[in-house]
Amino acid sequence: MPGIASQRHRFAIPEDLHYLNCAYMAPLSHGVSGAMVEGARLKEQPWNFRPADFFAVVEAFRERAGRLAKVDADRIAVVPSVSYGLAVAAANIPLERGQSIVTLGDQFPSNVYVWQEKAARCGGQVIAVQRPSQSCWSEAVLDAIGPHTAIVAVPHNHWADGRLVDLVAVGEKARAHGAALVLDLTQSLGAMPLDFAAVQPDFAVAACYKWLMGPYGIAMLYVDPKYHDGEPIEHNWINRAGSEDFARLVDYRDDFQPGARRFDMGEKSNPPLLEGAGAALDFLMEFGVEAISAELGHRTEELATEAQDLGLVSAPIGTRAPHFLSLGFPDGVPDGLTQSLAERRVHVSLRGSSLRVTPHLYNTSADTDALVQTLRDCLA
């Protein structure tokens, strides 16, 4: 089956620059940048931005986000960041004294600090599990879930090593013990399929600026319907029912817009962010997440084979996410590696003693060739 051809021509990436670092931040495509500029220009003539447009631009993004995740758009809230979305989750999930919150060891801080604060306030504890071997994280997470677990707060794959969490199995065990499942999907959504119906998360959030290929400052929050009567963390006018009628905004109301909209951020009707993020989702849906995942898996697997010939180690697909490759140096990171990478304009991330390589559709064989040659020279 033919793969997806390089989409380099749709990005402003110089030919001699080798950007293999999507897990850090995705570059904006020409289409996304253009959509953001057009969105910004709407404010040049505000007399043409009608009251209905405050809602239309948001709903267009919400509909796209729902289609990408294959969930009802009513389950999507528009938020500015992962930390905001997780704060919504923390405000709506109870934690009793003595109960625990399960996380991954060395998990990204946004999905740790909020739970540390909640545990301290409620008299609970955070259990950060450790991966006991070169396997994925699933066994450690499953072992930690028990009668005293109230919340399981994990990603689909670890942000540093790329190793997976079996979210279907974790979701099943969490529900068996009455625990809520909260997901940070920033390092996976858009690059790896997720069956929300099978996993059944209570909340799931993903920032748009990584694998969703969009701008900084916007994220999508999935909210299970059982929380649709929950408490938002801010109270803005546009999330209240009837806010479409600007003539009656001071007829203050206690009820909200339907679904997850009550959790939307204030000033959400921001065309540059919404139009840009929407165009990015269109780019992903042009190919489909399943096809993108397969293509990126093929690319990282080829690179892993070449790296193995250099004596580097990595986890196989199935243990790691297909779009993530963490290359380990058994004898330690070579002296001068980061300098050599910079000199050859190769952009990856060094995480401890491992090199995190995260390509996307804008990469070419020249990018991986430059990385492999740099590694070969440094290991010689």
Image (spheres, rainbow, N blue to C red):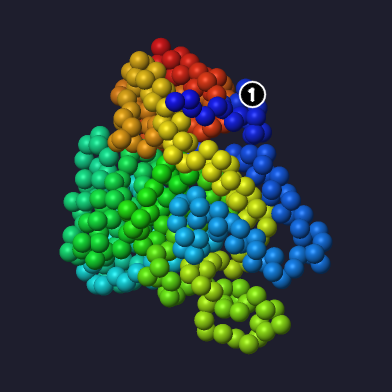
Which part of the image, by quadrant, shows the N terminus?
top left
Q: Which residue is mark 1?
A: 15
Residue sticking out furthest to the top: 380
Which part of the image, by quadrant, shows the C terminus?
top left
- To which quarter of the image does residue 99 belong? bottom left
317 and 136: which is toward the camera: 317
Measuring from the top left, give residue 377's x and y in whole percent.
46, 14
Measuring from the top left, give residue 224's x and y in whole percent.
39, 64
For residue 267, above or below residue 5: below
User: Tag 1, which secondary structure?
Assistant: loop
Residue 358 showing in the rendered view: no
Residue 212 showing in the rendered view: yes
Measuring from the top left, give residue 307's x and y in whole percent.
38, 20
For residue 349, above or below residue 183: above
120 and 293: which is toward the camera: 293
Measuring from the top left, give residue 75's x and y in whole percent.
46, 63
